[in-house]
Amino acid sequence: MANQSKDGDTVIIKKYANRRLYNTRTSSYITLDHLAQMVKENIDFQVIDAKTGADLTHSILAQIIMEEESAGEQMLPTNFLRQLISMYGNSMQALLPGYLEASMDYFRENQNKLRKAIEDSIGANPLAQLAQRNMEIFKAAAAAFVPGAPAREAEKPSAGEGDELAELRKQMAEMQKKLDQITK
């Protein structure tokens, strides 16, 4: 399901032959950085070729990812990229998009569970501010990976998830004890 813009409809961006992008809602020329910001703000848009009307949204989003990957710290590991490339033409190629989308949805759903487990385990430790800062960095990184992902409260965990969460809490409690010993 496509995310809707603040006005409830998709913003149309026209791409001209000179590679300029024109936002029809704001009646202004924009850059790829503007489009990246729109994604982060959960504003749905469609990029169309001004001459042919062809939908260019996919290639523009891929271009934004490529620029992000080449401009700074890379998020997509080299082995992942190799595996992704090897899937083109593979008999499993048709299944991969659905699998990747479901994986990203699962990642978003479990962000809050992980955050809450870590925060609960940290408690009143003197290093809580450092841990809180690390959590903010984690949230920022997650938001960068999944722009506009809505924060969802953790639902009641299933039996397997509860066991994993309990194990995570146990490990965090053990780490807490070790930190307490170090700081004394």
Image (cartoon, grey):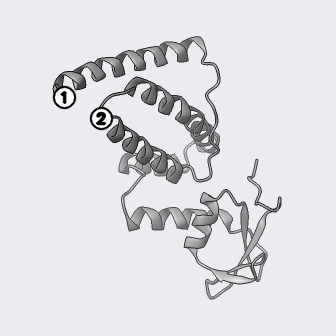
Number of residues whose C-alpha sits closer than 10 Å to that of mark 2, classed few (under 14), some (14–19) or many (20 or more): some
The type of residue carrying mark 2 is: Leu
Residue 54 in view here: yes
Estimate the x, y position of residue 125 in percent, counting from the top left.
32, 28
Residue drawn at the location 40% of the way across and 26% of the way down: 123
- Up-down: is 36 above or below 103? below
Toward the bottom, the furthest residue is: 18
Q: Is residue 108 left or right of residue 139?
A: right
User: What is the distance, in whole Å, between disc 2 and disc 1 at their CAs?
Assistant: 9 Å
- Up-down: is 168 above or below 4? above
Q: Which mark is residue 127?
A: 2
Estimate the x, y position of residue 31 in percent, counting from the top left.
58, 77
Which of the image's four quarters has the C terminus?
Answer: top left
User: Is label 2 in a helix, a strand or a loop?
Assistant: loop
Estimate the x, y position of residue 48 in percent, counting from the top left.
74, 73
User: Is label 1 in a helix, a strand or a loop?
Assistant: helix
Residue marked by disc 1 = 183
Q: Earlier in the sequence, mark 2 or mark 1?
A: 2
> Residue 161 versus residue 154: which sits nearer the camera?
154
Tag 2 near tag 1, CB within 8 Å: yes
Q: Is residue 95 left or right of residue 133?
A: right
Q: Is residue 10 left or right of residue 64?
A: right
Estimate the x, y position of residue 134 in percent, counting from the top left.
37, 43
The part of the image, by quadrant, that contains residue 91 is top right
